[in-house]
Image: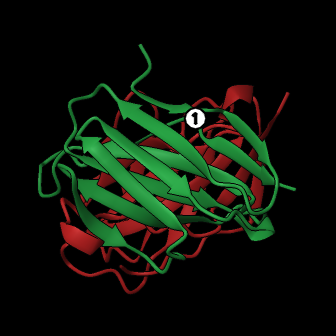
């Protein structure tokens, strides 16, 4: 069983389109995250949700909108895609912040290519 | 979070120990040292973490100097599958809110050669 899963694995789209990436975790964790890894391989936090509540919102264009329908899911919707949005997006989850074990478990990533 | 510095890359022979250094000279008393790795085309994977005592698990050992300003991750018998980028991260354990994020640096690329 996959602990943190993302769909799709690859996403190729045109500039200006709107797309979504889905993330699901079956670990029973309360906190979920989105990270972006750009072409230079830097991994940076974008958002985190704790039990459906937005906790972290780094300096990310408001074209990016995370949505958490329940604590096992955190989806990322991107409007009006731009070339610079091309990257690998990783979802992660962890137990409630403050818990003794706060290991973050990452999904396999979604490679987004904007043409 | 305190910053960390790591060499850009290193290599080791398969079956030998790989010792990956990390400097964190500005670490605070309540900050832990975490290690994650990212194998090519995969998501980051947790390896180990520690505060001041040496730690060992099924994947690796973590040696933290007495002054806590540096640490070394040891893979005792490196295999080809250990080829990856290894990230040393310093953060407060169980941090909440904005501090719950992981701040990744450039990491060190370990190449295990046959």
Q: Is residue B96 above or below residue A33?
A: below
- Which residue is at 39% across, 77% downward? B69
Residue A80, percent from left and from top: 67, 65
Is A85 placed left or right of A25 in the picture?
Answer: right
Is disc 1 surrounded by few (<14), some (14 to 19) or many (20+) residues within 10 Å? Answer: many
Q: Secondary structure at mark 1?
A: loop
What colour is chain B?
Answer: red
Query: Is residue A103 visible to the viewer in this orientation of the structure?
Result: no
The green chain is: A
Q: Which residue is mark 1?
A: A108
Judge whether B81 appears above or below A43 on screen. Answer: above
- Residue closer to the observer: A75 or B112: A75
Residue B12 rendering spot, x and y as whole percentages:
76, 42
Give A78 or B81, whichever is nearer the viewer: A78
Q: Quadrant of residue B56?
A: top left
Most extreme residue toward the bottom is B26
Residue B99 in view here: yes
Number of numbered labels in the structure image = 1
């Amino acid at each position: 069983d996959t602990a943190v899963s993302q769909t799709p694995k690859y996403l190729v789209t045109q500039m200006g389109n709107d797309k979504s990436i889905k993330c699901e975790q079956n670990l029973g964790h309360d906190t979920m995250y989105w990270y972006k890894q750009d072409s230079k391989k830097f991994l940076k936090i974008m958002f985190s949700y704790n039990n459906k509540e937005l906790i972290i919102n780094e300096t990310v264009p408001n074209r990016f909108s995370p949505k958490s329908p329940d604590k096992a899911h955190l989806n990322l919707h991107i409007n009006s895609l731009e070339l610079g949005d091309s990257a690998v997006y990783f979802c992660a989850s962890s137990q409630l912040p403050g818990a003794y074990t706060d290991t973050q478990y990452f999904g396999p990533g979604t490679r987004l290519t904007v043409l | 979070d305190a910053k960390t510095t790591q060499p850009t890359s290193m290599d080791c022979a398969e079956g030998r120990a790989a010792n990956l250094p990390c400097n964190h000279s500005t670490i605070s008393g309540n900050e832990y040292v975490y290690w994650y790795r990212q194998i090519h085309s995969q998501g980051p994977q947790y390896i180990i973490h520690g505060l001041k005592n040496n730690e060992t698990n099924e994947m690796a050992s973590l040696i933290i100097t007495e002054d806590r300003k540096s640490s070394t991750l040891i893979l005792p018998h490196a295999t080809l599958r250990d080829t990856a980028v290894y990230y040393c991260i310093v953060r407060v354990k169980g941090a909440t809110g904005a501090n719950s994020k992981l701040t990744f640096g450039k990491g060190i690329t370990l190449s295990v050669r046959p």
